Image (cartoon, rainbow, N blue to C red):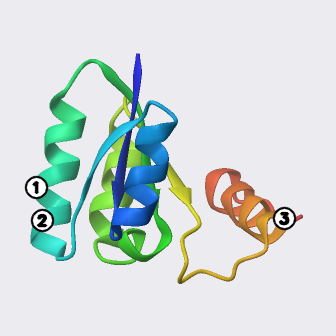
């Protein structure tokens, strides 16, 4: 099983490649939608890392994949545009997943 990174900037993509994670750089919602569809069809990809900014481009598509597909696992990674606190992000994931406010 492999990781795959979808980012909106070359620096993130190059850093992931140095760690052995292949990926691609996209800038539009059409490119992102096409790339995420291809990643979902690839049985070798288990986890898709997606930069924070790209997650906001197609929230409905991301939600549908998380809800209806067993693989891949979609994980949001911070990028240079995000200023999120990791504990707030984890709390939000729990709230969305099980509907419990912590």
| Crowding near the residue tagged with mark 2, few <14, some 14–19, many ≥20 C-alpha atoms within 10 Å | few
Q: Which residue is mark 3?
A: 87
Q: CA distance from mark 3 to mark 1?
A: 31 Å
Disc 3, SS: helix
Question: Mark 2 and 1 residues: CB-CB less than 8 Å, in contact?
Answer: yes
Residue 50 image-quadrant placement: bottom left
Residue 20's tag is none
Residue at image x 16%, y 31%? 41
Q: Which residue is mark 1?
A: 34
* Residue 69 shows in the view: yes
Q: CA distance from mark 2 to mark 3?
A: 30 Å
Residue closer to the observer: 15 or 54: 15
Residue closer to the observer: 52 or 95: 52
* Residue 74 shows in the view: no
Upstream in sequence: badge 2 or badge 3:
2
Question: Mark 2 and 3 residues: CB-CB less than 8 Å, in contact?
Answer: no
Q: CA distance from mark 2 to mark 1?
A: 5 Å
Residue at image x 59%, y 66%? 78
| Crowding near the residue tagged with mark 1, few <14, some 14–19, many ≥20 C-alpha atoms within 10 Å | few
Residue 66 % position (x, y): 41, 47
Residue most toward the right?
102
Residue 37 % position (x, y): 16, 46
Residue 57 in the image: above or below residue 63: below
Residue 52 % position (x, y): 49, 70
Upstream in sequence: badge 3 or badge 1:
1
Q: Which residue is mark 2?
A: 31
Quarter of the N terminus within the rendering: top left
Residue at image x 54%, y 71%? 79
Residue 24 in the image: above or below residue 41: below
Quarter of the C terminus within the rendering: bottom right
Question: Mark 3 and 1 residues: CB-CB less than 8 Å, in contact?
Answer: no
């Amino acid at each position: 099983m492999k990781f795959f990174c979808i980012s909106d900037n070359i620096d993130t993509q190059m850093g992931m490649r140095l760690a052995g994670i292949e990926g691609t750089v996209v800038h539009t919602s059409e490119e992102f939608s096409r790339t995420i569809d291809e990643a979902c069809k690839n049985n070798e990809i288990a986890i898709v890392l997606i930069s924070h900014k790209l997650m906001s481009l197609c929230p409905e598509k991301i939600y549908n994949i998380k809800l209806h597909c067993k693989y891949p696992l979609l994980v949001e990674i911070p990028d240079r545009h995000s200023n999120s606190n990791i504990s707030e992000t984890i709390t939000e994931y729990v709230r969305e997943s099980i509907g419990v406010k912590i």
